[in-house]
Image: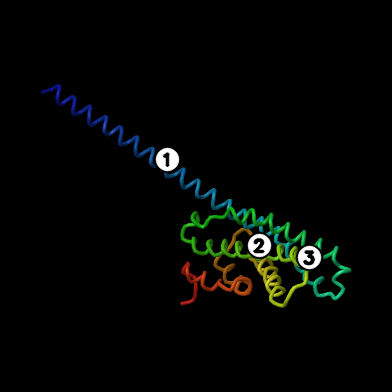
Amino acid sequence: MASSKKKNINWRKSLGFLLTISIIINVIQYLNHNDYIHQQRQQHYNSLWIISDQGENLVNQLDKFLALTENDAKEELKVELDNAWRIAFGQHNNMHWYSAMLSSELMGRKKSEWSMLQYSFNRINQQLQYYNSLFHERNGYVLDEEEREKLAAIASFYRIYRERTKGDSIDIDSMLAMINEPMMVIDENYSNALTRVGLGEE
């Protein structure tokens, strides 16, 4: 009888010890996961600031490029046009490397807002890749009115984006409200995309 009681006590002690260890392990995993999420979110914000800093040069080069394409003597300005577009497109590719690393899945309650910001970056990337291929096909930089309007909207997007990312914090909601207008020009499906993630107008 005494031996049986002793075994029960030892079994309970062992069970209690295992439960304690399990709880400690779960707490450590939870804290490590939270720490990972925090670090990843901070990296996302750091990427936004890097994109903002580099975006200023992109805007300057796009503005220069658009101004040059308005000149009738385009052949005489081809070297300048080549340089302006090459720098703008190269700057964009570098910025896209940072925007491509963003993941809305890690952003908690702001998942939809981050998803739309990433969507915007992707649509701009697709548009600029299209223009780069188009210029190669045309062997020149002749733009129709719609093409000029979209390029100007991209410059406007990054001009607004840079303004909204100054300071120590970034308000995603405010930024989305401000970039709405240029994105409507850049992407005809932008309104539908907002609706799909629950951010469109009711």
- Tell me: 196 left or right of 91: left
* 26 up-or-down from 181: above or below: above
Q: How is the image coloured?
A: rainbow
Q: Distance between the residues labelled 2 and 3?
A: 38 Å
Q: Quadrant of residue 99?
A: bottom right
Instruction: Work out whether mark 1 precedes mark 3 in sequence or the reverse, and give the earlier one.
Output: 1
> Quick one: which residue is furthest to the left in this view?
1
Amino acid marked by disc 3: Asn
**Within 10 Å of the Cα at label 1, are there few (<14), some (14-19), or many (20+) other Cα atoms?**
few
Q: Nearer the viewer, mark 1 or mark 3?
A: 3
- Tell me: 89 left or right of 182: right
* Residue shown at 70% from the left, 61% from the top: 55
* Residue shown at 72% from the left, 78% from the top: 145
Which is more toward the observer, 13 or 176?
Answer: 176
Can you say which quadrant of the picture contains the N terminus? top left
Q: In which quarter of the image is residue 89?
A: bottom right
According to the image, label 2 marks what residue? 166
According to the image, label 3 marks what residue? 139
Asked if labels 3 and 1 touch by Cβ distance under 8 angstroms, the answer is no
Amino acid marked by disc 2: Lys
Q: Where is residue 120 in the image (x, y as percent from the top left)?
A: 59, 65
Instruction: Work out whether mark 2 precedes mark 3 in sequence or the reverse, and give the earlier one.
Output: 3
**Within 10 Å of the Cα at label 2, are there few (<14), some (14-19), or many (20+) other Cα atoms?**
few
Amino acid marked by disc 1: Ile
